[in-house]
Image (cartoon, grey):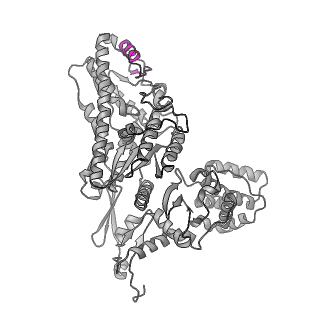
Amino acid sequence: MNPDITIAGAAVTGYGEDLIKAGLSIDFGIVETVAHFKAASYFCPEVDFIIDIGGQDIKCFKIKNHSIDSIMLNEACSSGCGSFIQTFALALGYDIADFAALGLMAEHPVDLGSRCTVFMNSSVKQAQKDGASVEDISAGLSSSIIKNAVYKVIRAKSPEELGKNIVVQGGTFLNDAVLRAFEMEMGRDVIRPAISGLMGAFGAALYAKEKSAGESSIISKEDLEHFHYTSKSAQCGGCTAKCGLNIITFADGGKFISGNRCERGAGKKIDKDNESIYDFKYNLLLEMAESHIENPIATVGIPMALNFYELLPFWKTLFNEVGMDVVISDESSREIYYLGQHTIPSDTVCYPAKLAHGHIESLLNKYVDFIFYPCMSYNIDEGESDNHFNCPVVAYYPELLIANNSRLTADNFIYPYIDLNREKHVLSVMYDLLKKYGITKSKVKSALKKAYKSLADYRNEIFNKGNQIISRARENNQKIIVLSGRPYHVDKEINHGIQKLITSLDMAVVSEDAVFQYGHYPHPNVLNQWSYHARLYRAAQYVTTQPDMQLVQLVSFGCGIDAITTDEVREILESNGKLYTQLKIDEINNLGAAKIRLRSLVAAMEDK
């Protein structure tokens, strides 16, 4: 380092931002989406669209009025990124640079589509059998990356959607074949800066230049030469989430803690004003389940899975009123998942459904008299929809459970077909089920009235709590996130503490069932036959009327019908000037990508 140089400011961005900022005393941290936007704006002040393809991810930004209007990222894996081409280059015995150069000269590029790497392998092998040259395969792979980005990440219908001034960046676009494939697909020339692979760093440098007001706090050359750290693992005991922490201690005694989902895990005091309705709903259900009746005539087991996260008040009240005790399964965890893993017939089903298998095993181990899990084609009709189906998994999962668990029998697993919209039908079914215990029809009828009231009271409590959180947020000038999803997304093992991540960014969190009553969206562009979807549409419409609200949608991997929902929710929001943010969640609890999206959302909200 030149002793005559004074560093006025330093900024860091990317997945290691917080760690580097803490370890090297960097002045500023900037979310990488904003860093890329700043860099692109430097080279093209009138930029309309930015696409960044790196080694492992794709980031796309629509720009409107010189601010980020929407953000799109690839969801599931690194297919369609730089590592995609590198994998095939190495497999064919080529250096990545040489392989890319060959593709630029191809005369007959192979059409490989835009599929997962697993399927692409077979396509490449078939192309080789058909006599395709290495040049044609290289060009085909470059085209495949572009098709994946344009039609699966951006979901563009035409080049006009991207605007006139397009900036491409990321190390993958240093590949001339990829650049040319993009220009050919879009039918126009685009701007590729010479530092395409360093745009994030360049944007961070521009940010540091804007924000610096003197000399940087970055560590000195001497401190850097003696820099060292120690690392240890620990488990946070601040709540039942029991986050796995990694604690790094630096030479100067400073600490950096990762793995925590909230401020408590980082050793900070939690702001009570940032209470999340997700935690409220979850605790309310657990408290409800803790009450038991004396001398019950039978003990009923209810698995805390899927739609029971909404209907527990109904079923618990009904069974308690006829003299039966209710025992719920243990809280969801990786251990619960492993407990039932051997009975899961397909790994393609969503994680919430996989967890149901463990909850059944949990109840079997509690030796309840029987497990109650009704099949429910319909959810409760809430109006403003073409129909009110449950999704097929929620509706008929009991059938799958008994077919795949040898411990379940007709005696210990009761799964009648029930439609809660038809009270006389429910009375008939439940009386037939309970009469062998000496329970009269009038007793069931009375219990049923109280069960419907209990469910209505629970829903009203959620609605009222949502209003309280919204009012308090507005008193404190906080932004409000409607974290929307399904009833089971309150399960801590499923949401992985995303709601705590949002409150740590100083935003309030409510759920779609706390606000959808205010929304009206009777005529969507799709067949509106799913009850939970109708809620999402109404919640999204309401958000468009509130200047201090944005909606974030939780989606589980493996949910086929959400492919329809997400597009419709996006249309509702973006056509009314709101941002659309989707977070896909499954077994993996690393929230690094989710945090980048949420911070990007915060930055875009501030710009707006």
Residue 571 in the image: above or below residue 221? above
Residue 430 at x, y percent in the picture: 37, 16
The residue lying toward the viewer, choosing from 8 and 298, is 8
Give residue 465's position: percent from left, percent from top. 28, 41
Residue with the most extreme left position: 294
In this picture, is 242 found above or below 381? below
Q: Which residue is drawn at 43% across and 19% down?
A: 416
Does residue 103 appear to the left or right of 1 in the view shown? right
Residue 412 in picture, x, y percent from top left: 38, 20
Say if residue 351 shows up in the picture. Answer: no
Tell me the quarter of the picture where residue 97 sits: bottom right
* Residue 431 part of the magenta-drawn span: yes
Quarter of the image for the N terminus: give it: bottom left
Q: Quadrant of the C terminus?
A: bottom left
| Viewer-side residue, 437 vs 598 | 598
Horizontal side of residue 144 vs 581, given as left or right: right
> Which residues are drawn in magenta?
411-433
Picture coordinates of residue 158, whole percent (x, y) = 64, 53
Magenta segment includes 400: no
Q: Nearer the viewer, residue 299 or 450?
A: 450
Q: In this view, does 576 lie to the left or right of 285?
A: right
> So how many labels did they put on this image?
0
Tell me the residue at 25%/51% (across/down): 273
The answer, for residue 581, to whether it is visible in the render is: yes
Please tell me in which quadrant of the rendered image residue 211 appears: bottom left
In the depicted structure, whether residue 324 falls above or below residue 207: above
Could you tell whether 462 is left or right of 195 in the image?
left
